[in-house]
Image (tube, helix red, strand yellow):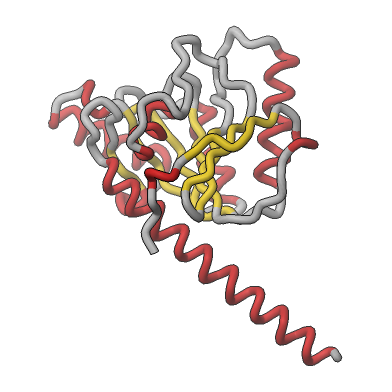
Amino acid sequence: MAINYQKAKFTASYGTSAQLPDSVRPEVSFVGRSNVGKSSIMNKIFNRKNLVKVSSTPGKTRSINFFECDWVDFVDLPGYGYAKVAKTEKDRWAELMGVYFGDDRRFALVVSLIDIRHPASALDEQMIAYLKRFDFPFIVAFTKADKLGRNALNKQMAALRKQLDVPADRTVLTSSFKGTGINDLRKLIEEACHAEVDATKLARAEAAAQEDEER
């Protein structure tokens, strides 16, 4: 079953870990540095202009924002790496993100966004290492592809894949301005969500069978 992106709607915003809701649908989470173009990419996926608020001020998104889209939840995570944010705020973000990723949630896919124009930052490297270490399903979406020519894009993609040690089939080149890679990104999202649904059904069936044996 395809995802009907026309049904996308804002659900809620949570500023503390205690507020986070239970996970009831497959979740597609978007994470990246402040000003990487996360909101713009999400709006392009939804084919909407302002559903996900685009801020001209990096670091302004300070909560975890949920969007229900048909049978999937899309999660807009706070951007990281903005130097002008106070340490107490950075600590709050770190705690919020830590609880979110440490929770027992229906993680279908984590989309890690990285600006194609620059080498990945230390925080980007840490994020990818974290996703690998705990075996999260993830892909890397390179943003702002419209800002470089073809030769520069190919060179940068090769360099970033090497830097992050991520294979080509787990990366996608995107541009919210031109729409580059958006259909590819949607396809990867849908495949991951279907895989999560199948895995959840299997786990529930195995749990039910185990309960029957124990009775």
Residue 206 x/y as whole percent: 67, 81
Residue placed furthest toward the right: 215
Residue at 55 percent across and 50 percent down: it is 27
Residue 166 appears in the rendering: yes
Nearer to us in this view, 90 or 22? 22
Residue 62 x/y as whole percent: 63, 22
As displayed, is residue 65 above or below residue 165? Answer: above
Residue at 36 percent across and 32 percent down: it is 48
Residue at 33 percent across and 46 percent down: it is 185
Q: Is residue 52 left or right of residue 2?
A: right
Residue 166 x/y as whole percent: 39, 47
Residue placed furthest toward the front: 7
Q: Quadrant of the N terminus?
A: bottom left
Q: Is residue 215 left or right of residue 30?
A: right
Among the 4 quarters of the image, the one containing residue 181: top left
Residue at 70 percent across and 27 percent down: it is 15
Nearer to us in this view, 143 or 14? 14
Q: Quadrant of the C terminus?
A: bottom right
Residue 135 appears in the rendering: no
